[in-house]
């Protein structure tokens, strides 16, 4: 049975045995994992291309990377606010409502994204100075952030389309499009960085243009091809959809703000350790993100499976599948952590020719490999809880683990151990976070599903 047939069994109140549940999880997660891997490889290639320009160019992007995550994260709540509702509406077989929620989500993403993009563009030159960047990297960092902000509306449209298709159980098309987007990014980067010799600015332009192409295609697919979302319906906002979107999305935006602010503060701590440490930190984070992909793939599968099971009011099945998704994510990310430990030196050598940066970054990757299984649990469970409509707890747990464990420990250890210290703090915090999320999943279903 394919994924659509298995999802139909959920909507029609038919049983799924353990093997069918595992098959459905893997069928939906693998396309998302491959897409995430391709996106990460795109980031690796970006970093490698920029790395050939020298340590200062790499440090410029690394300096504002945390700010781009923060801005993008703040906008994610609105995307999830409507995609979770759409998944539950499809599970309840209310296709008119799902189609309308899809359209409302697109408008909401634009209404939020455009003002934030303009504000970000206005302050893009000052942000690198606020982060304590070295004089040789501030100019390029500001240009990179400027282009990112101007392209933010299309980035949000891309995220909206991906999340909406995933909520409908389609992970293949958005996955394939993200892979094509990566190839386009490489081509555009080669043109702008080397052909037109725009350096760091060229890397930003190449990424923005590739995202634009992906967003346009996926918008067409949502409105013309997907059987659950293409139905003609109103773009008009309804009170109920807005209230539910706020209830789901605001905690997610707060959660992303907590995580994004953490990266900003973490970068600020690292920026005091010198250009080599900034570059090694940036490269190591990019390389490590390859390990995250199984967790995010399982979280994408949870969007459709758990969301539709909740919409169909099948709490027992949703609970069973939630634990299976979590176990699969932990096993996959444990395996990816082993690979990262073994290939740490090779990964860093792909990103930078600077031997000193390679050695330091490889040490960071070997250290972080031991946190991957528990981090996988937290990523998958966050996706499960979002699909259920439970978004307050992930925000609270992230706040506890990040601001009560990671940041204080990173600041304390940085003054005594250099860059190794903050990464030890990160390792400890990710393990603590995984335990907290496992505790929450154990108690999440006692009051039944959170229908929206």
Image: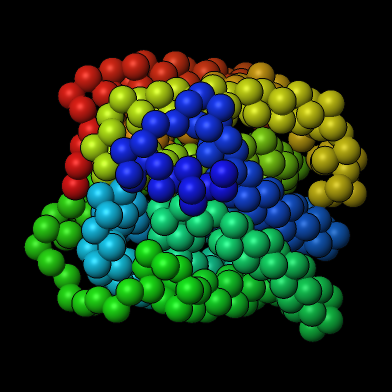
Front residue of 267 and 13: 13
Residue at 65% over, 62% down: 176
How many numbered marks, from 0 up? 0
Front residue of 313 and 416: 313
Quadrant of the frame with the N terminus = top right
Q: Residue furthest toward the left?
A: 239
**Residue 372: where, in percent of width, then height?**
62, 25
**Residue 157: where, in percent of width, then height?**
44, 70
88 shown above or below 52: above
- Left or right: residue 402 versus residue 144 is left
200 shown above or below 9: below
**Residue 88: where, in percent of width, then height?**
28, 49
Q: Residue furthest toward the bottom?
A: 196
389 shown above or below 369: below
- Left or right: residue 51 versus residue 219 is right
Is residue 421 in view from this perspective?
no
Is residue 172 in view from this perspective?
yes
- Left or right: residue 382 versus residue 181 is left
Quadrant of the image occupied by residue 239: bottom left
Quadrant of the image occupied by residue 160: bottom left
Residue at 16% over, 60% down: 242
What colour scheme governs how the chains and residues are painted in the rendered image of this protein?
A: rainbow
**Residue 363: where, in percent of width, then height?**
77, 26
Front residue of 314 and 5: 5
Residue at 13% over, 55% down: 243
Residue at 56% over, 27% down: 19
253 shown above or below 52: above
- Left or right: residue 334 versus residue 234 is right
């Amino acid at each position: 049975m394919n994924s659509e047939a298995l999802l139909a069994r959920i909507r029609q109140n038919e049983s799924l045995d353990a093997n069918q549940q595992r098959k459905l999880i893997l069928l939906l997660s693998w396309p998302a994992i491959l897409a995430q891997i391709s996106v990460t490889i795109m980031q690796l290639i970006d970093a490698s291309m920029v790395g050939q320009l020298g340590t200062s160019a790499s440090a410029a992007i690394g300096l504002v990377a945390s700010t781009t995550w923060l801005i993008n994260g703040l906008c994610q709540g609105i995307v999830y606010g409507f995609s979770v509702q759409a998944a539950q509406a499809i599970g309840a077989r209310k296709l008119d409502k799902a189609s309308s929620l899809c359209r409302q989500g697109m408008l909401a993403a634009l209404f939020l994204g455009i003002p934030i993009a303009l504000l970000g563009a206005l302050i893009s030159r000052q942000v690198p100075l606020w982060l304590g960047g070295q004089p040789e990297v501030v100019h390029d960092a500001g240009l990179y952030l400027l282009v990112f902000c101007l392209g933010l509306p299309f980035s949000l449209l891309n995220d909206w389309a991906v999340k909406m298709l995933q909520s409908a159980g389609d992970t293949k098309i958005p996955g394939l499009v993200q892979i094509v987007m990566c190839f386009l990014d490489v081509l555009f980067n080669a043109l702008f960085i080397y052909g037109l010799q725009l350096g760091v600015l060229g890397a930003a332009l190449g990424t923005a243009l590739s995202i634009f192409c992906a967003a346009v295609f996926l918008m067409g697919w949502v409105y013309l091809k997907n059987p659950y979302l293409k139905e003609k319906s109103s773009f008009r906002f309804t009170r109920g959809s807005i209230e539910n979107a706020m209830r789901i999305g605001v905690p997610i935006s707060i959660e992303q703000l907590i995580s994004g602010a953490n990266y900003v503060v973490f970068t600020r701590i690292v920026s005091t350790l010198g250009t080599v440490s900034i570059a090694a930190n940036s490269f190591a984070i990019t390389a490590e993100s390859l390990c995250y992909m199984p967790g995010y793939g399982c979280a994408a599968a949870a969007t459709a499976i758990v969301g539709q099971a909740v919409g169909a009011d099948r709490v027992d099945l949703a609970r069973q599948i939630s634990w299976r998704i979590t176990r699969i994510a932990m096993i996959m990310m444990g395996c990816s952590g082993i690979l990262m430990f073994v290939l740490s030196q090779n990964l860093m050598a792909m990103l930078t020719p600077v031997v000193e940066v390679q050695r330091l970054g490889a040490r960071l990757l070997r250290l972080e490999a031991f946190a991957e299984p528990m981090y996988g649990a937290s990523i998958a469970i966050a996706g499960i809880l979002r699909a259920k409509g439970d978004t307050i707890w992930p925000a609270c747990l992230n706040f506890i683990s990040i601001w009560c464990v990671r940041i204080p420990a990173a600041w304390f250890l940085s003054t005594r151990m250099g860059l190794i210290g903050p990464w030890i703090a990160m390792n400890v915090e990710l393990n603590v976070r995984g335990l907290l999320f496992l505790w929450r999943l154990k108690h999440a279903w006692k009051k039944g599903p959170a229908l929206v």
